[in-house]
């Protein structure tokens, strides 16, 4: 397998429960390396743009509201087969 990079978003429910460290430990235990990481607060407009592919689905509004409800942690993960993992 090739070394790959992929996006990870730790969602608002996990960040509010302070689970970021535990989630990152699981990524690292799976052989992935965190090469970039940032804690951000998405606006409803940013969430809407990111999830635009789901705009016609009934859960779209709730998804955007949820993603803008609290900070998220966005990160770049790298490793063998990172996308599949």
Image: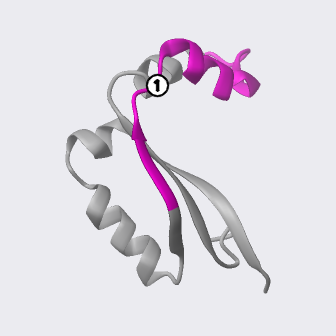
Query: On the picture, is 47 further left or further right than 84?
Result: left
Q: Is residue 10 visible?
A: no
Q: Is residue 66 above or below residue 81?
A: above
User: Where, quadrant-wise, is the N terminus in this rendering?
Assistant: bottom right
Magenta highlight on residue 19: no
Where does the image place residue 50, in percent across and percent down from the top left? 65, 28
What range of the chain is rendered magenta?
36-58
Where does the image place residue 78, in percent across and percent down from the top left? 62, 72
Q: What element carries label 1?
A: loop
Magenta highlight on residue 39: yes
Q: Is residue 28 visible?
A: yes
Residue lying at 73% horizontally and 15% vertically, measured from the top left: 56
User: Where, quadrant-wise, is the C terminus in this rendering?
Assistant: bottom right
Mark 1 nearby-residue class (10 Å; few <14, some 14–19, many ≥20): many
Residue lying at 20% horizontally and 45% vertically, measured from the top left: 17
Count of labels in the image = 1
User: Which residue is more in the foreground, 5 or 13?
Assistant: 5
Q: In this view, does 11 lie above or below 77?
A: above
Q: Is residue 16 above or below residue 79?
A: above
Where does the image place residue 14, in percent across and percent down from the top left? 30, 46
Residue lying at 40% horizontally and 28% vertically, measured from the top left: 41
Question: Which of the 4 image quarters holds residue 12?
Answer: top left
In the image, farthest residue toward the right: 2
Where does the image place residue 52, in percent across and percent down from the top left? 71, 22
Residue lying at 32% horizontally and 28% vertically, measured from the top left: 70
Q: Mark 1 points at which residue?
A: 42
């Amino acid at each position: 397998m090739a070394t790959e990079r992929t996006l990870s978003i730790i969602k608002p429910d996990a960040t509010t429960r302070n689970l970021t460290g535990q989630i990152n430990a699981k990524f690292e235990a799976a052989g992935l390396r965190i090469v970039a990481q940032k804690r951000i607060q998405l606006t409803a407009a940013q969430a809407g743009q990111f999830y635009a592919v789901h705009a016609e689905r009934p859960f779209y509004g709730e998804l955007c509201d949820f993603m803008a409800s609290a900070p998220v942690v966005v990160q770049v993960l790298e490793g063998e087969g990172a996308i599949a993992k």
